[in-house]
Image: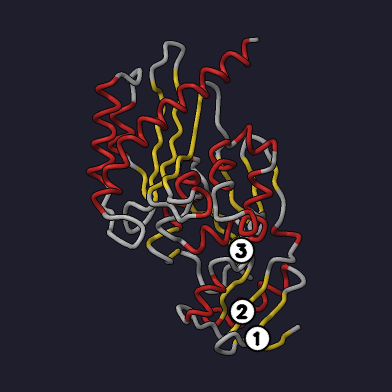
């Protein structure tokens, strides 16, 4: 079914009632199509004139793109909303940092409408979800009329509003690695008005520990501090093998600061963003250690 909508310019609106219709539209019109799910970012860009699609393909109704399944891997449908993720008890257990980040995406109204895949495909350097997806070894599943492929999120997002999605492809789901034994993770965000504000800086961390409290696995990712969300690989390496002593934490914070390349904008200066990173690292690694300790106590009770 097709009608015309015209906020400031005209585009054809295709309200897909099934996955086959959506894929057929992409196969036939690919480069002319912009995919619409929740629209919390896209419609603002559309009305501003930042994007000018000929065809808007609405996929929010598609049942094939909905749902959450928790197991050896966490599977989340593309149009699952932020609030559905944040409020799901299994996600708070299997991927707690994702639940934390989802609860910080805009207002409650935004969380009720905005979708997981929409946030990822928008590829904002300030995305709250992308740092968590990076530390979770998340992958994106893409479907076209002829192929299905899976890409790591770190490869899928290549820059600001730029991804590896082909014009004839639709993101159908994301897969995440759940937290394991003796593992803690968190997402921390600095913003002027908490969840209502785009992150000045955001940082996700996932740390695993051995029985003696030494770090056996470290993943740290940062948003709003470079042209794209990034993994802080040098800082991760510095924390490996440490027991989170003062020197290791201080040096890891400095390594994150060196890796970052923030900008100055209306929300904060580049210098201010850079100075926030070391305190965020400190808070994040302590939170991971505390969460891991609680998990261990519960597991042995």
Task: Indicate which disc, 3 or 2, sits on the residue closer to the N terminus.
Answer: 2
Residue 50 versus residue 3 in the image, above or below = above
Q: Position of residue 67 (x, y in %)?
A: 72, 51
Task: Indicate which disc, 1 or 3, sits on the residue closer to the N terminus.
Answer: 1
Q: Secondary structure at mark 2?
A: strand
- Please state if 127 lies on the left or on the right of 224 as rendered: right
> Which quadrant of the view contains residue 162?
bottom left
| Residue at (50, 40) in percent of width and height | 136
| Residue at (39, 38) in percent of width and height | 220
Q: Position of residue 100 (x, y in %)?
A: 56, 41
Identify the residue position indicated by label 2 in the image.
Answer: 56
Residue 16 versus residue 143 in the image, above or below = below
Residue 193 versus residue 118 in the image, above or below = above
Asked if the residue under mark 2 is in contact with the one under mark 1, i.e. CB atoms within 8 Å, the reply is yes
Q: Tell me the quadrant of the picture where the N terminus can be found.
A: bottom right
Asked if the residue under mark 2 is in contact with the one under mark 3, i.e. CB atoms within 8 Å, the reply is no
Tell me the CA gap for discs 1 and 2.
9 Å
Q: Position of residue 197 (x, y in %)?
A: 48, 55
- Please state if 226 lies on the left or on the right of 164 as rendered: left
- Tell which tag, 1 or 3, sits nearer the viewer: 1
Label 1 environment density (alpha carbons within 10 Å; few <14, some 14–19, many ≥20):
few
Tell me the CA gap for discs 1 and 3.
27 Å
Q: Secondary structure at mark 3?
A: strand
Residue 94 versus residue 101 in the image, above or below = above
Q: Position of residue 72 (x, y in %)?
A: 63, 35
Identify the residue position indicated by label 3 in the image.
Answer: 143
Identify the residue position indicated by label 1 in the image.
Answer: 5
Tell me the CA gap for discs 3 and 2.
18 Å
Report the front residue among 45 and 272. Answer: 272
- Please state if 251 lies on the left or on the right of 13 as rendered: left
Task: Indicate which disc, 1 or 2, sits on the residue closer to the N terminus.
Answer: 1
């Amino acid at each position: 079914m097709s009608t015309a909508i015209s906020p400031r310019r005209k585009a054809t609106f295709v309200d897909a009632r099934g996955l086959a219709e959506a894929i057929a539209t992409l196969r036939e019109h690919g480069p002319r199509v912009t995919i619409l799910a929740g629209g919390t970012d896209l419609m603002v860009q559309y009305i501003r004139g930042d994007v000018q699609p000929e065809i808007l393909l609405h996929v929010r109704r598609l049942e094939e793109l909905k749902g959450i399944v928790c197991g050896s891997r966490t599977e989340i449908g593309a149009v699952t909303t932020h609030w559905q993720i944040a409020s799901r008890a299994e996600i708070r257990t299997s991927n707690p940092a994702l639940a934390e980040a989802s609860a910080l995406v805009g207002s409650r109204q935004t969380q009720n409408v905005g979708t997981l895949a929409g946030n990822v495909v928008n590829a904002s350097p300030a995305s709250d979800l992308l740092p968590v997806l990076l530390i979770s070894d998340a992958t994106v599943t893409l479907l076209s009329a002829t192929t299905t492929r899976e890409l790591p999120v770190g490869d899928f997002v290549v820059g600001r509003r730029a991804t590896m999605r082909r014009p004839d492809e639709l993101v159908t789901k994301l897969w995440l690695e759940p937290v394991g034994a003796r593992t803690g993770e968190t997402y921390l965000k600095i913003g002027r008005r908490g969840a209502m504000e785009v992150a000045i800086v955001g940082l996700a961390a996932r740390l695993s520990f051995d029985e003696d409290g030494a770090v056996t696995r470290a993943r740290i990712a940062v948003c709003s501090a470079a042209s794209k969300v990034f993994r802080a690989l040098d800082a991760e390496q510095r924390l490996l093998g440490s027991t989170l002593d003062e020197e290791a934490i201080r040096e890891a914070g400095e390594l994150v600061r060196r890796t970052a390349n923030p900008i100055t904008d209306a929300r904060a200066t580049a210098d201010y963003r850079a100075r926030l990173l070391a305190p965020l690292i400190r808070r994040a690694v302590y939170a991971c250690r505390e969460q891991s300790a609680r998990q261990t106590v519960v597991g042995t009770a």
